[in-house]
Image (spheres, rainbow, N blue to C red):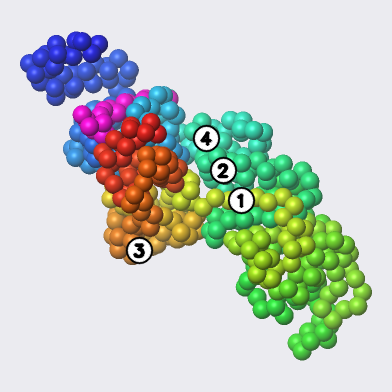
Amino acid sequence: MAGSDHLLNRWMRCVGPPDAMRNMVEMLSGLCGPRVAVFAVDSQRNVVLWNAGAEELLGFTSDEMVGQHCLKANRCETCIRACGMSDNGRIDNVPLVLHRNDGTAIRVRKTARSLQASDGSFAGGIEVLIPEDELRAPPIATARPAPRGIVAANVDDTGVLHFHGLWSRDPGMHQAFEIIRNVGETDATVLIRGESGTGKELAARAVHNESMRRDGPFQAVNCAALSPTLLESELFGHVRGAFTGAVKNRPGLFRQANGGTLFLDEVAELPLDLQAKLLRVLQERTFVPVGGTDPIQVDIRIVAATHKALRQKVREGAFREDLMYRLRVVPIYLPPLRARRGDVELLLWHYIGRYAKRGPRTIQSVAPEAMRALLDHEWPGNVREVINVIQYASAVGRGPTLLMGELPPEFRENNTASSWPMTPQRTDVDEADQLRQALARTGGHIGQAAKLLGISRPTFWRRRKKHGV
């Protein structure tokens, strides 16, 4: 076909590219149906062509969309991977659930092709959305069997897993889900490691719900939130007269969790003397209440969590090594949100939908500049920060579109500059590794990877092509 390009170019100059494109789109719409959306975007993903089918399918007119960022209408409930046209060059029949202008959801299949400039950089592309049926779809696609035997999760055709309140399409999270399911069949002690806000308590509850103890109690305590004296009484209980104010017996969480699960959050903050008592419970399944003399036997499972490295705490003399090994029989790691970029948009729309039900505001779309800021954010507070941002925007703004000015102040202070600059002097091997690391850290997003390295998008493309990354 390349040999005939000069003939095609000559013909295009004669008839005019806009007319040729519009007629081709009109014929496609006539063949495939009036609700087939066909649109084209430029290098900045601003819409340059929006057909009548797109108007019908997504509810935005051509006047509303031409010149606007495609995210204004291409609002995907479950997937950011189909926005990877600039990264992968093509998308073939990928299932998506999109939101219409009126907030309803519709199931579609997306096919797209990217176009490149002479320097290899992304120059835009053409996208086609075909509705799977004429019925409005639910926000999440119908569940199908989960990968690798995960049976307590809902997984849709885009690879999104809903597992006991945790949502992710990230392989690292899926691996954690699988470990949780498998360990649930045993009574092994579990240690969950992850940064603040990654969902450690939800993971602990998932361990409980996947176990034979699911019908028993689930008790939780934050070991960093109480003084040592209060924490000891909270965990082990006390007898009447054990100390001033102890006017009656108190059972404590170990007894309250009998037959179920006790979750010890921030276990690294447990004082050394209480660590010894916890070790006794793990070894003998007995404990003595504060002020008591008779041991009490309990049947519980311990799930602990921390955002700190217990081995480092052991080296510092702040944590017992024998207790560490007792707690981390099965370690589970929850990766931070910045390491699973593909989950950011998924979680944003999930919580937008959740808070829309609580009113008074219903967010139906996100302004392009606001979405770019949200996707570029490092999310140091992880999923908890996502929730806070959506709560903030729902509280301070009104209207169906979330605007840049309705995001918290840190999004408007341009504090998202990379703290990971490229090495000034590097070999080709170093440069290739940095390209790979940047892609890994941004979930394969070319624009974000280029920003992380402090280079332009075309430069990133050229270096990626050079090294075959």
Q: CA distance from mark 4 to mark 1?
A: 20 Å
- Residue 333 visible to the viewer: yes
Question: Which quarter of the rendering shows the C terminus?
Answer: top left
Residue beneath disc 4: 159
Q: CA distance from mark 3 to mark 4?
A: 32 Å
Compared to residue 167, the image places residue 143 above or below, namely above
Question: Which quarter of the rendering shows the N terminus?
Answer: top left
Residue beneath disc 3: 410
Numbered range of the magenta stretch: 111-132
Tell me, yes or no, whether the two marked residues, 2 and 1, touch with CB atoms within 8 Å: yes
Q: Most prominent secondary structure in the magenta stretch?
A: strand
- Decide whether residue 3 is among the magenta residues: no
Q: Which mark is residue 333?
A: 1
Tell me, yes or no, whether the two marked residues, 4 and 1, touch with CB atoms within 8 Å: no
Tell me, yes or no, whether the two marked residues, 2 and 4, touch with CB atoms within 8 Å: no
Compared to residue 229, the image places residue 376 above or below, namely above
Q: CA distance from mark 2 to mark 4?
A: 13 Å
Disc 1 is placed on an element classified as: strand
Residue beneath disc 2: 172
Q: Earlier in the sequence, mark 3 or mark 2?
A: 2
Q: Earlier in the sequence, mark 2 or mark 1?
A: 2
Toward the viewer: 97 or 289? 289
Which three-letter amino acid code belongs to the residue tagged 4? Gly
Which residue is located at x 62 percent, y 60 percent?
309
Q: Quadrant of residue 91?
A: top left
Q: CA distance from mark 2 to mark 1?
A: 8 Å
The percent coordinates of residue 315 (x first, y second) are 67, 66
The percent coordinates of residue 290 (x first, y second) are 82, 78
Observer-side mark, 2 or 4, equals 2
